[in-house]
Amino acid sequence: MDLRVKDKVYALVGGTGGMGLDAARVLAADGARIALIGRNRARGEPRARAMAEETGSDVRMFEADGTVQGQIEAAIEDVVAQFGRLDGLAVTAGTLQTRRTLTELDDATWEQYFHLIAAGGGTIVNTAAYSIRAMKPPLLGYATMKAAVAALTKNIALTYGAQNVRANTVCPGFIATESTHGLMKIYAEKYGLPPMEALNKALSADFHMNVAMGRVGLSEEIADLFAFLLSPRAGYLTGAVINCDGGTQF
C-alpha cells in the first residue's frame, strides 16, 4: 500500500528501537523523511544510517531523554530546523503530563504540537496499552497513566480537528521488543525452550494472560498500524483508541 508519505517528515519518540523503529522503517520505505528520537546516540545513529541505506530515505537520529525536562522539546525544535517541517509525531516511549487544554499549557512538553498546527495540520499517534481496558491492582500507576494518555489524545483530536490535526491512540498487548530480551532469557532457562517459545508459554502460565492468538506480538506486526495512522491514508480517522493485542481477553 502506498501510504502517500513521500517527502513528509515524521518524528518518532522512542524511534531508536522496538515499535518506533519498525514503524519508522515502514514510513521510510515509502519515502518519508524520518527523525528517530532516543536517548542512546551510540545505538540510534548506526540504526538511522542503516535505515537510510536500506530505504534511500533521509533518516536522522536526534538525542533526547524524555525524563529530562526540555530535551524532547529541544529535539523537536531541531527536527523542524533541520527538515524545515513536521508532518507527524508518534510517541512510542515515555510518559505525558498535562494540565488544562493544549494551548493553555505552560509546560514546554507540549510545544512540539504547535509545529503541526502552524504547518496547517498533521498527525499524532500516542501509545497507551491494552491494560487501560483491563485494570489490575499491581498495575495501578501504569494503567492510570496510560488511560490518561488515551483521554488526552482524544481531547487533542476534538480540540484541533478543525485545524487538520488528527490524533489517535494505539493500545498494544504484550509485544516482544528489545526490552523483553531479558524476560526471554529468564523463561528460556525456566522452561528449557527457545526464547520466543518460552515467552509464549509464560504469557499464560506466569502472566495469566488469555490471548486469543496464544502468543506475544511482534514489533513489526504493530509497526504498520503506527505508519498507517500517521499517513494520509488514515485521513478521516481521529480520536480512535485502537487495540492491537492479539485478542487479549480481560
Image (cartoon, helix red, strand yellow):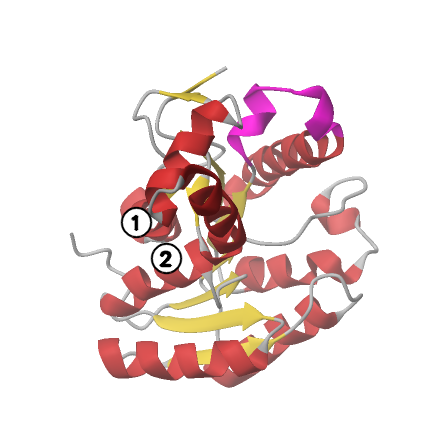
Residue 138 lies in the magenta stretch: yes
Q: Which residue is at 48% across, 82% downward? A: 45
Q: Residue furthest top?
A: 250
Is residue 198 or residue 47 the one in the foreground? 198
158 lies left or right of 15: right
x and y percent of residue 18 in the render? 45, 57
Q: Residue furthest right?
A: 106
User: Mark 1: which amino acid?
Assistant: Asp
Is residue 52 or residue 181 the one in the foreground? 181
Is residue 96 shown above or below 170? below
x and y percent of residue 226 in the render? 38, 49
What's the magenta region? 129-140
| CA distance for labels 1 and 2 | 6 Å
181 lies left or right of 112: left
The answer to whether residue 165 shows anywhere in this view is no
For marks 1 and 2, the one nearer the N-term is: 2
Is the residue under label 2 in contact with that under label 1 (CB below 8 Å)?
A: yes
Residue 224: numbered disc: 1
Within 10 angstroms of label 1, few (less than 14), some, or many (20 or more) residues?
Answer: some
Dot 1 lies on which element? helix
x and y percent of residue 90 in the render? 50, 55
Dot 2 lies on which element? helix
Residue 23: numbered disc: 2
Q: Main secondary structure of the magenta part?
A: helix
The answer to whether residue 94 shows anywhere in this view is yes
